[in-house]
Amino acid sequence: MRIASADVVVTSPGRNFVTLKVVTDDGLVGLGDATLNGRELAVASYLQDHIVPLLKGRDAHRIEDTWQFLYRSAYWRRGPVTMSAIAAVDVALWDLKAKAAGMPLYQLLGGASRTGITAYGHASGRDTDELFDSIRHHLELGFRAIRVQTAVPGITTLYGVPTTPANPGGRHDDYEPAARGALPAEEDWDTRAYLRHIPTVFEAVRAEFGPELPLLHDGHHRMTPIQAARLGKALEPYDLFWLEDCTPVESQEALRLVRQHTTTPLAIGEVLNTVWDYQTLIGEQLIDYVRSSVTHAGGITAMRKLLDFAAQHQVKSGIHGPTDISPVGMAAALHLDLAVHNFGIQEYMPHSPLTDEVFHTSYRFTDGYLHPGEKPGLGVDLDETAAARFPYQAAYLPFNRLHDGTVHDW
Ligand code: KDG
Ligand code: MG
């Protein structure tokens, strides 16, 4: 099974996606997601200009060899652009191998370790009433675990809490932070206001919805370790499933201090892209959940090794799954989720109807559980005619300034 051609498809059905399409000499098509929110064209160029010329004529079955070749021959290792590009090739090759075998990909990864993949949804609101409505809405949709983000008095625009719905007439819990336009939006941040307010929100949510519902929260990299420790401690009475990205993760050692102070479970890693980024975090058991995505962390081949390392230290998966992971990347995550033993939870934000016009998927969400479906390969088809109707549009993630004008982590 030789690679006959490889093409990069950039499309923007509501938001930008970069997809690698690999075709074999016997006509099989494999897809890989290469979407890096706000920096899409860098990965598209890395693939088109530097990787596609290397793929033609290669044996599509040699996945490990291709991974090692792309990683080591580049010399310049790691980083989100490189690892997203390698991931796209890797996932496309796994898609091809599973199609050639006539099996859904999870069968090649060892078969199902569970019958369904527990997914968490995103609830948010500009005040308590809106937040409670959003939680109820997610419960009606079937979610069995819910991430809670709310507005904070003293902060004008806050991560995870849209001031306007993503779709005209839509709900305020539809979440898409990358706005189209020539410049990134400026948002504001006040750590003291946030730390005062968030525990009161979780107290109210527990009082309204009871003790059983698994609740998650994303701190989105904004606290120092001592502030994160304080928040984790303050949230202990409300029994969170996890507190995510409580502090920027460039310094893995920073998590030691957080860990010493709180038993709130910690999830980290959506911006990490290799196993090396987790050496201390996992080796010293400083976190409970790995948040990397298949899309940004080198694909199925690399994520499987990362999760095996995590398993030795009782750390579980919590694969990143917002809408900037394309349906191809989401399908890859679901096959892995179903197969690995140390699955924890999967993030799930349904894509927009426009996105669904371009990507046709076999995965399903039923009664709170996702399943990748039984079609051979990933179970995703790309409609290139539909994709061509939605040309790329520049979009940026926002950035933060403190009230005195200092740039802060977003
Ligand atoms: O592109 C940025 C998003 O992927 C990120 O903000 C989403 O933090 C996120 C999450 O947990 O889904
Ligand atoms: Mg996050």
Image: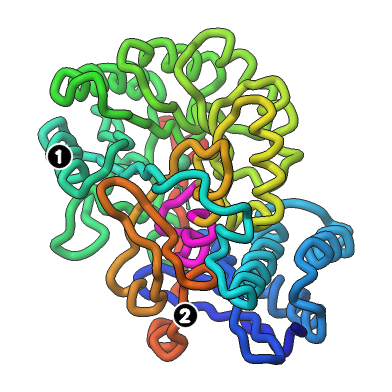
Report the residue at 52% width, 78% height from top: 10
Label 1: which secondary element: helix
User: Dot 1: few (<14), some (14–19), or many (≥20) neighbours within 10 Å?
Assistant: some
Label 2: which secondary element: strand
In space, the residues marked 2 and 1 are separated at their CA atoms by: 34 Å
Amino acid type, residue under disc 1 in the picture:
Arg
Amino acid type, residue under disc 2 in the picture:
Leu
118 to 266, vertically: above or below: below
Highlighted magenta segment, given as a residue range: 320-334
Q: What is the x, y in percent for residue 278?
A: 69, 34
Q: Is residue 299 left or right of residue 166?
A: right
Which of 272 and 141 lies nearest the eye of the viewer? Answer: 141
Q: Is residue 377 left or right of residue 71?
A: left
Residue position marked by numbered label 1 in the rendering = 136
Where on the picture, by quarter, is residue 255? top right
320 to 282, vertically: above or below: below
Which of 6 and 224 lies nearest the eye of the viewer? Answer: 6
**Is there any visible trace of residue 250 in the rendered image?**
yes
Q: Reading the chain from its start, which is encountered first: label 2 or label 1?
A: 1
Q: What is the x, y in percent for residue 54?
A: 81, 79
Res. 382 mark: 2
Report the residue at 58% width, 58% height from top: 295
105 to 258, vertically: above or below: below
User: Dot 2: few (<14), some (14–19), or many (≥20) neighbours within 10 Å?
Assistant: many
